Image (cartoon, grey):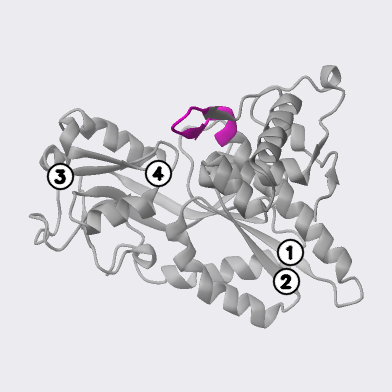
Amino acid sequence: MFMKFFYYKGFWQICRWNIDWKNMGGIVMNTTQLECFVTVAENLNFARAAAILHITQPAVTHQIVSLEGELDAKLFIRTTRSVKLTPEGWSFLADAKNILNMTYGAKAKLAHQAREEVRFFGIGCHSALELALLPPVLQKMRERYPQVHPYINLIPFSSLQNLLDEESINVMMSFQAEHVKKEPGTFLELAKVPVSCVIAPSHPFAGRSRLYLEELRQGGMVLCEPGKNPAAIARVQGQLIGYHPPEELYFTENPACALTLVEAGLGFTLLPDVAAMRHPRLIYVPVEDAGVLSYGLYYKSLKDQPVLKDFISFMRGPFSAKAGDA
């Protein structure tokens, strides 16, 4: 299962901290180190990671220490009570997963050379909510291109940009980036979507057809970590957070987690209102003065890319009606 991994195209560019390649003599790592790192990162517990990997806890610790030495970066903050990822650890997590997936994909491809060639089609998503858009699209893709195997990357926007730039993915589902010197690729807009206040049916705003930011200065408010929502949402959250005392604020990792707290009646959250991505048991009320976002797809080029062209064509289906319609 474990293979030596010495280098892959663009890895040193994808790492988002500076690595002195010459002084290090080249990064040499193996899948054991990466599997240990990813498992600990996903569980934030060394003992649990060891049990999952069927190795001893000291072995897991050794692999992590060895990896940190090779990267010259601290990946975890470890105390007697908790394990947390450092900023460098968060940054490296998506790359580590990508390296492992490329390695496993290469092994699978080599193991089935005698069969019809399998082609991989990489799709980047920044939010779990986007996954609801894909099943009917992928079904059509399967019917037309049975040899094409989709691979979905669910990681933050900044990491997706790197994968698209390196052509490790073919297309990225995203809201259009704001205030950037250079966009990650060609952007194709699928819909203009409003920012909505998402609430439970029991919330006092449930009967409203529209809201204004001033009205959202009180009551429970559920927020996502920066980078897990479009910049426009983070900006609006920043305008409101100062009006709420600490006991009214609930922090979550991503929009999917935020919706769970909203459904529990803890407060409202703000999200771009893409109809096909709505939670079926919650209410979406447009916030008139919160702006409008552009949702669509980023890609590098359509030249000699029939699979990508058809994927884009199929993706237009969920947006044939207005994104804000129920």
Instruction: Give the number of the mark in front: 4 or 3.
Output: 4
Image location of residue 122, percent across then percent down: 66, 58
Residue matched to label 4: 253
Image location of residue 166, percent across then percent down: 72, 44
Residue matched to label 1: 120
Residue 183's disc is: none
Label 3 vs 1, first from the N-terminus? 1
Instruction: Give the number of the mark in front: 3 or 1.
Output: 1
Label 4 vs 3, first from the N-terminus? 3
Image location of residue 311, percent across then percent down: 61, 68
Query: Which one is nearer the viewer's eye here, 268 or 235?
Result: 268
Residue matched to label 3: 212
Instruction: Give the number of the mark in front: 3 or 2.
Output: 2
The amino acid marked with disc number 3 is: Tyr
Q: What is the magenta range? A: 78-90
Q: Looking at this view, name the residue that lies furthest to the bottom.
A: 143
Q: Residues within 10 Å of mark 1 (few under 14, many from 20)?
A: some
The amino acid marked with disc number 1 is: Phe
Q: Residues within 10 Å of mark 3 (few under 14, many from 20)?
A: some
Label 4 vs 2, first from the N-terminus? 2
Magenta stretch containing residue 81, yes or no? yes
* Whether label 3 touches label 2, CB < 8 Å: no
The amino acid marked with disc number 4 is: Glu
Image location of residue 78, percent across then percent down: 52, 28
Residue in view at x 20 percent, y 27 percent: 242
* Whether label 4 touches label 2, CB < 8 Å: no
* Left/right of residue 45 with respect to residue 240 in the rendered view: right
Q: Residues within 10 Å of mark 2 (few under 14, many from 20)?
A: some
